[in-house]
Image (spheres, grey):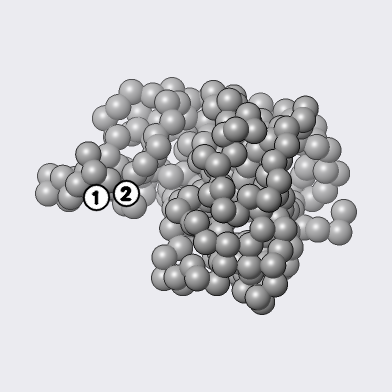
Amino acid sequence: MDKHIYLDVDMDYFVSPIVKVSVDNVRLYHNESSGVEAAAPAVKTLREHGLSWKAESISCFTNHKTSYTHWWISKKRDNILLHIDAHSDMYRNGSKDLRKLPNGNIQCYNYIWYGIRDEYIGEVYWVIPNSIKELMEPHRAPEIINKELISEVHRDDRGLHIIIECIVITGELKKVPVHVCTIDMLPHFDAVCHKVTLATSPEFVPASCDDFVFEFLLSFGGSKETAQNIYNQHKNMLDKTAEEIAAAWDKIGR
């Protein structure tokens, strides 16, 4: 295929229950109980859908907004994003003109908007866990994308399909397809992923899931050394004062 594919995976896709909101660098839910789903079956399904990737294309990190940095480094345009995540990471944007996005505000919850704005991303597949597949109902589309940007919505056996209209960095009005589906619903791609970004998002997973960092990263082709480094980052983030934790709870209004 002509377009490059960016595979972008968040560890919280495999963790339940899903944490809806958090604060950068503060693990507010670290004491909560949770469960994990094995990552290897998801990798197997991706390969059955014709996807492959090379070890040198893999980048691993904690904060998911770092994915945008790798797209910026590549500078390749109009790519297909396979976003495997419990969250859309397309939040908090109600403006059709993406040029209004402040450059200093790229976060884990909105970095995909910046990828679309700068024309690195031209099509999105948001692959959701089976536990939230009710989001594929057409009437739920405005919960995923601000209704002011939606020009078309339809549902078929491949999931929910939303066409958004937005003004990108060049000033052009573009139509960008956003597909919401489960991993089994993905089409067959027959392609090598140009870039694979793997985020562990410690703010969204309890400390009891930290050991899963190894299975998650190794299943997708990350190295054991990298997994150990990121595991250590998870544990280091637990060293917060009571004041820092209280301030984080205040920030999210709880």
Residue 36 or residue 247, whichever sits in front: 247
Q: Quadrant of residue 246?
A: top left
Q: Residue at x 24, y 50 (%)?
A: 251
Can you name the residue that lies furthest to the bottom here? Answer: 170
Q: Which mark is residue 23?
A: 2
Answer yes or no: is residue 7 visible: no
Residue 251: give its label. 1
Quadrant in the picture for the N terminus: bottom right
Left/right of residue 35 with respect to residue 56 in the rendered view: left
Where does residue 102 sit, x and y in percent of width and height? Answer: 45, 70
Viewer-closest of 221 and 143: 143
Q: Earlier in the sequence, mark 1 or mark 2?
A: 2
Task: Determine whether label 1 and label 2 are within 8 Å by CB.
Answer: yes
Which residue is at a point 65% across and 75% down the rendered structure image? 171
Residue 82: percent from the left, percent from the top? 67, 46
The kind of residue tagged 1 is Lys
* Quarter of the image with the C terminus in it: top left
Q: Amino acid at mark 2?
A: Val
Q: Tag 2: Cα neighbours inside 10 Å, few (<14), some, or many (≥20)? A: some
Query: Can the viewer see residue 126 in this picture?
Result: yes
Looking at the image, is 75 positioned above or below residue 181?
below
Where 177 falls versus 217 (above or below)? below
Using the rendered view, name the quadrant where residue 32 is placed.
top left
Q: Which residue is at 62% across, 45% downward?
A: 83
**SS under mark 2:** loop
Instruction: Find the distance from the CA under tag 1 to the CA under tag 2.
Output: 8 Å
Q: Mark 1 or mark 2, which is nearer to you?
A: 1
Disc number placed over residue 232 in the picture, else none: none
Q: Left or right: 248 with respect to 84?
A: left
Given residues 25 and 104, the one toward you in this image is 104
